[in-house]
Amino acid sequence: MTGNNAFLHIEGCDTDRLFSDVKTPCYVIDEKALITNGEILKSVCDDTGCRILLAQKAFSNFTLYPLLSQYINGTEASGLFEARLGYEEMQGKEVHVFCAGYRSDEFEELLKYADHIVFNTPTQLRLFGKRAKASGKSIGLRINPECSTQEGHEIYDPCAPKSRLGTTRALWDELMTDELVSMLDGLHFHTLCEQDADDLQKTLTAVEEKFSDVLPKMKWLNMGGGHHITREGYNIGLLKKLITYAQEKWGVTVYLEPGEAHALNAGYLVTRVLDLIRNGDTDIAILDMSAACHTPDVIEMPYTPPLYNSGKEGELMYNYRLGCPTCLSGDIVGDYSFDKPLQMGDMLIFGDMAIYSTCKSNTFNGMALPDILLLKCDRSIEVIKSFDYRDFKNRLG
């Protein structure tokens, strides 16, 4: 089950030897893959003049920020802590913030770190806009073009019915006064999730239809995240055309703030088999990692992550359900097949584990947080962060 180039940079390696000394489970971030992604993103900036940010919600391993900063223009944050992280660790770069609701007791500190502040509603703009403007910040409003391009994952669809994210045209017409409009430097929309440029094209058409009278008054247009720019087969040519169209049509600077694209296929979760059991006609392997704790998107989305040297259930000779050691009955990674039977102690390597993993991991059931390692370009391994019992205990009291 090796799709989307998840193992491109370790394909053909002796992985047993490469990871022979690591303590499992552990995350391994691949430096070479980060560079490959960075070069693709930088080429989009160079060819169009747009500016690309790192959405830290997907990848916030700040040890790698100096590397990423060579290719991008800054960070995007969802609140105070992410804004501070981007300000401190990607120094000299832009810091953009969007939050559905800002806290009055945090806003003054937020102004220390942010360059751009995007509000979700005219009400939030009225509450905080003058303070932000007086501090010299660039002000934006998130709009909702009411154009859904997703199917089956409403939890990830900002344009789903009854969405709380963004200002619809009806709400704009009801609440936006001339004074509020005059505060704005830009508009922001974020409607995509792991999608291609054709869906951006549909969204941009809807944005133009609903806000064509407003766009020429703006200095910038932020097209949000969800752009899978570094995925194999992504239509980069169309993306560049859309960016150029917006910039020439409305005289704006275009921003993109993908998260996954920066670290797509740039990490692994290395784990080992603890036990093998059989229930009816199902063979089950218990791993030393937890889907619920270490790869929560596997359960939340849900999805079945790619696994090195394996196949889908039924593709190869030996089928196994890969489960985890917590008490949660549904703590299961998925069903896979192998060309030979698994043995206790076998190493397994899940792919595309740099995104929404280290930043979402948790210690449910007292599970230890996996160490975070860096696989360098020369294929040596460096420990970025290790965890122990104190990390579990100290966050609880």
Image (cartoon, rainbow, N blue to C red):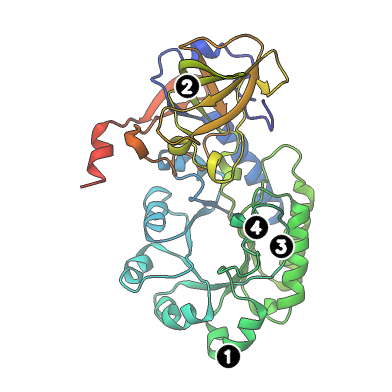
Foreground mark, 3 or 1, reads 3
**218 shown above or below 231:** below
Q: Closer to the N terminus: mark 2 or mark 3?
A: 3
Say which residue appears at 77% left-offset and 60% top-offset.
201
Secondary structure state at the residue bearing disc 2: strand
Q: CA distance from mark 4 to mark 3?
A: 24 Å
Q: Which residue is mark 3?
A: 148
Q: Closer to the N terminus: mark 1 or mark 4?
A: 4
Residue neighbourhood size for the residue with mark 4, other residues' Cα within 10 Å, grouped as few (<14), some (14–19), many (≥20): many
Q: Which residue is mark 4?
A: 50
Q: Are marks 3 and 1 in contact (CB under 8 Å)?
A: no
Q: Which residue is mark 2?
A: 286
Q: Which residue is mark 1?
A: 178
Foreground mark, 1 or 4, reads 1
Q: Closer to the N terminus: mark 4 or mark 3?
A: 4
The amino acid pointed to by label 4 is Cys
Estimate the x, y position of residue 16 in percent, counting from the top left.
51, 11
**188 shown above or below 315:** below
Say which residue appears at 50% left-offset and 27% top-offset.
323
Q: CA distance from mark 1 to mark 2?
A: 62 Å
| Residue lying furthest front | 280
